Every structure is written in C-alpha cells, then in structure tokens.
Amino acid sequence: MGDAMGPIVSLADVVHRWPGHSGFRLCIDTFELARGQTALILGESGSGKSTLLSMICGTISARQGEVTLDGCPLSRMSPAARDRLRGETVGVIFQQFNLLPFGSVADNILLPLRFAPTRRTKVGTPRQAVETICGALGLSDVSLNQRVGALSVGQQQRVAVARALIGQPPLIVADEPTSALDYAHQSAFLDLLFDQVRSTGAALLMVSHDARIATRFDRVVEMSEITKASELRR
C-alpha cells in the first residue's frame, strides 16, 4: 500500500463538522499510531471517538486537514479507492458486531475477503483459515455452517473478531467492543483479542469510556489530549 516504515495512521490539522449541527465540530491537531502498536482512546459518550474511527477508516471525510492510512492520504483518493484501501488495511470490530444474522459463521468471517484480494491471498484455503482462527478464539465447538443469529452474544462477538482478523490486516479498529460485557467476560475477551493481534503483528486502535482496561495497552490517550477542547462543543 503506502510507506511500510511510517505510522499506520496519522492525522494532522483535522477538522470535521456534522451537516446540520453547526455548533459541533471535532478538531484534532495531530495523532499517530505506529505499526504494531496497541492504543486506547478514552472519552465519554459524545466526545467524538466513533467519529474519529470513521475518519481513520475513510467512511467519513474530514472537512480539512489530512488523514493518512497506511501511508495513503485519504483526501487525495476517490471513494472507491478509499473503500479498497480500507478493505485491505483495516479489520473493524463494531460495537453492535454488524454480523449477517442469517449468514453462516464461515460466511460472516470470510466476508471481508470478497473486497480485499491481497488479504485473500494470505489465507491459503479459506475454510481451513476459518477453522484455525475459530480454534484460536475458542469457537472450535461451533459449526462453521451454523447461522450466526443462533449463537450466543459471546460467540457472536468472537465471530466479529475473527472477521476483523482474517487475512491479517495491519490495523484492527475496535469501537467500544466490551461495553456490553461484565468484568470477567471483558477480561477473557481482551485476552483473546490481544493474543491474536500480537500473533499477526497488527496495530490495535480501540476507543472506550472504560479506563479499567487501560493497563493492557502500549499507549493510552484521552480524547481531550488530541482535540482542541475549545472547538469540541455542541
């Protein structure tokens, strides 16, 4: 993709405004995430955490400034090119999982590879790759042909992680993935996630409001540290 030696993510002088919400804008002077680094961004609800992730993934565009993903400045790319870059570079774990409930476990996990040919070449035999990653995530007892909607919440969460990890993207982005878990289940989930991230060498960028998980990360950043507080308002 881009510069293999530079940061996997960088933002400089970024401003985003929401259409129809003239009193609310998110301004970020600078932020970088190194390759292979794990970072947690802490902030309360409404602080702009999810918007930040959306700008990094290229699903929304900054009104000014530059967001660079894997060495590629997103503002200079067409929407189709941004979609291709995101598919190859980023594995996303959504807060609500965003699985296809009537699709099988295997179909859900393999879905990103339809849009990411480079990631597809890394998996060898797709079915075998799914079996391997499910085994690593404690899903060995789940049929790959089973409908995802019939799984428990914890199992669905692990399928969502497997989908993000398949094909070894260099960046995993997680939006409040532990918000619905109690402490014991949260800890077990994070153990699995960190084991898998480290095994592939991916960077991990997670946003959360829960400071209890901060000790697990290489780096912890408060949203207030990277935003211009006087300009983050509503």
Image (cartoon, rainbow, N blue to C red):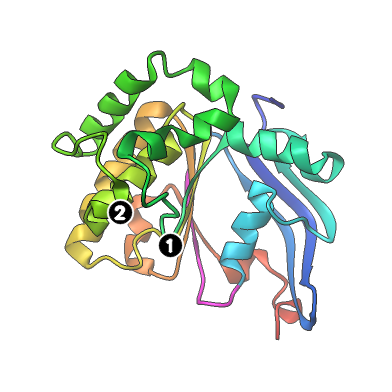
On screen, 158 above or below 106?
below
Residue type beneath disc 2: Gly
The residue positioned 72% from the left and 56% from the top of the image is 60
Which residue carries the number 2 mark? 149
Residue type beneath disc 1: Glu
Helix, strand or loop at disc 1? loop
Is 42 colored magenta in this rendering? yes
The residue positioned 59% from the left and 31% from the top of the image is 115
State how far apart marks 1 and 2 are (Cα): 21 Å
Q: Nearer the viewer, residue 47 or 132?
A: 132
Question: Where is residue 73, by image quadrant?
Answer: top right
Within 10 Å of disc 1 (Cα), the crowding (few <14, some 14-19, many 20+) is some
**Tag nearer the camera, 1 or 2:** 2
Regarding residue 114, the answer to whether it shows in the image is yes
Rendered location of residue 122, percent (x, y): 47, 17
Which residue carries the number 1 mark? 176
Please report the bounds of the magenta region as a residue range.
38-47
Asked whether disc 1 touches disc 2, contact meaning CB atoms under 8 Å apart, the reply is no
Rendered location of residue 224, percent (x, y): 61, 71
Is 212 left or right of 110, judged from the image as shown? left
Rendered location of residue 150, percent (x, y): 24, 53
The residue positioned 63% from the left and 39% from the top of the image is 86
Helix, strand or loop at disc 2? helix
State the mark number for residue 205: none
Q: Nearer the viewer, residue 38 or 45?
A: 45
Is 28 colored magenta in this rendering? no
On screen, 38 above or below 226?
above
Q: Nearer the viewer, residue 35 or 58?
A: 58
* Earlier-in-chain disc, 1 versus 2: 2
Is 115 left or right of 13, judged from the image as shown? left
Within 10 Å of disc 2 (Cα), the crowding (few <14, some 14-19, many 20+) is some
Regarding residue 73, the answer to whether it shows in the image is no
